Image (cartoon, grey):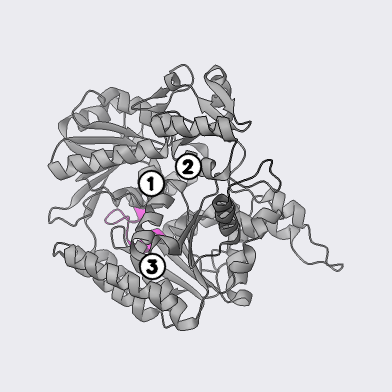
Amino acid sequence: MRSLLLGRLLAHLDQVSADAKPSQVNDWRRAVLVRCLAMADQPAGVFSLSVPTGGGKTLASMAFALAHAKRWQKRRVISVIPYTSIIEQNTAVYRDALGAEMVLEHHSNFRHPDDRDGVEAEDAQKLRMAEENWDAPVVVTTSVQFFESLYSNRPSRCRKLHNIPGAVIVLDEAQLLPLPFLEPCLEALKLLVKDYGCTVVLCTATQPALADRDWLRYAFDHVTEIIENPTALHDALRRVEYTWAGRLSDGQLAEYLERHDQALTVVNTRRHARELFTLIRDLPGAVHLSAAMTPLHRAQILARIRQNLRDGRPCRVVSTQLVECGVDIDLPIVLRALAGLDSIIQAAGRCNRAGRPQPGQVTVFEPSDHGTPSPWREHANLARRVMTEEFPADPAAPEAVAWYFRNLFQSQDLDRAGILPLLAANARLNFSFRSAADAFRLIGDGQVDVTVPFDDEARSLIQQVETNGPRHDLLRDLQRHTVQIWRKDAQALKSALRTVGERVLVLTPAAYDAELGVVTRGE
């Protein structure tokens, strides 16, 4: 099976290479792939794959994982992705290359209760069991599902654990490991490598300093870098220039976007994105993207963006940070509200992605009309220092990223919920497993899922839930039509919500805007 999958992937990559236009960027992508295949012969352990955005990490990391699994008889590949907003995209890439039957996609949005009323269809039961057991050669899942399962005490979450040993675990966008739980996450990964035969791959353009014990108490003992010279690769794939603009108002941003036909502006909150878009919505090619829109709606907007770019038409995009990881769009100008350095660099990955001779322009600004959300203020302060004091010539350089993460780790409580003390051995070997499981929640309970009857498919699925109840297969299909909103916003929208099948909240169409998504707080 491992040989079959590797053969399929390499054949797919050969076809992709044959179809690609000759360019320096594509030459470097091939070089990254060759290096990944060569390093797959290294013994099991912890690896890092440090490749700039647009360098072909998604398929190159899978090539390493499958070649490594073949060489060392690993059981499966588990791809761990931070955001549900990109998991479907990556899964589609893997299925296209490896075959749909070889790839299992497992989201965390809809969790199976241990007991359920009603009887599911046989195929739905099989799918449910495959998901709960991760019984597939390639599993694509979320950080929430992966790490919460490792610390869970619930049977439905624990059924998959026996299929994790002997796996190659690829952590996509490893810099997004949640800082309040970073130490428990690292301890779990170290245990999987040390005692359960796993290999871990930290895959990112902004590599956090996870092997530096001077800055991190629970650092990995050793991390093998797959790329021979990450600094040289960064220099070769450097396609943008960074500029610090200082404080800018929404009015100034709107004036800038009016002067430039194609540009992407990324801000930190849904509210800011809505308000800025409202100022430019009448300009040609103006579009808005945020998690207030359903995944299917966002996919439709992204398709329109790509078509406008291919046709050379105006394309003025205002978005939250959901475009920063794994979204393949390429604009000549990116404006990024001040945030963490990794977010800034990821946003820059949407600029001059194809490597045109003229460098792309990335402008970082501090919004004068909107403050930085409190959880990310220290991230933003350190990024400002990188851009204005420490590394102004190239804030995306590997040494700048290392400086940023080292100082960030020092400023944070990396086990905020106190998980590890609950699991520390004492004289009586009493472990607080239940307390640890209850405390390990990467996403709190502050949000609720709201289903939007935005098109015929959504309306049909809602009708089936009303008729047949909340079957697992229906809930999966509804996921593309679902938005997560804060509970206080759900309370404000109470008159616009109804419950279907005892568990699915459905929004009235009048509360969903075709450009902005879910409309709350009297907007």
- Residue range corresponding to the magenta coloring: 389-401
Q: Work out whether residue 264 or residue 238 is closer to the camera in this orientation and state it.
A: 264
Q: Where 523 sits versus 94, above or below?
A: above
* Relative side of 333 to 153, left or right: left
Above or below, 379 relative to 355: above
Q: Which residue is mark 1?
A: 384
Disc 2: CA contacts within 10 A as few (<14), some (14-19) or many (>=20):
few
What residue is drawn where x is 61% and y is 74%?
196
Q: Position of residue 42 (x, y in %)?
A: 44, 82
> Mark 2 or mark 3: which comes first in sequence?
3
Q: Nearer the viewer, mark 3 or mark 1?
A: 3
Q: Nearer the viewer, mark 2 or mark 1?
A: 2
Residue type at tag 3: Ser
Quarter assignment of residue 430: bottom right
Find out whether residue 98 is within the magenta segment: no
Amino acid type at image mark 2 = Asp
Number of numbered labels in the structure image: 3
Residue 291: image quadrant is top left
Q: Decide: marks 2, 3 in contact (CB < 8 A)?
A: no
Q: Which residue sits at x=64%, y=50%? A: 416
The local crowd at label 3, few if under 14, some if 14 to 19, many if 20 or more residues have their Cα within 10 Å, is many
Label 3, on which residue?
61
Quadrant occupied by the N terminus: bottom left
Q: Nearer the viewer, residue 260 or 91?
A: 91
Tell me the element at label 3.
helix
| Cα distance between the residues tagged 2 and 1 | 42 Å
Side (left or right) of 289 relative to 217: left
The numbered mark, 3 or 1, whose residue comes first in the sequence reads 3
Callout 2: helix, strand or loop?
helix
Which residue is under mark 2?
477
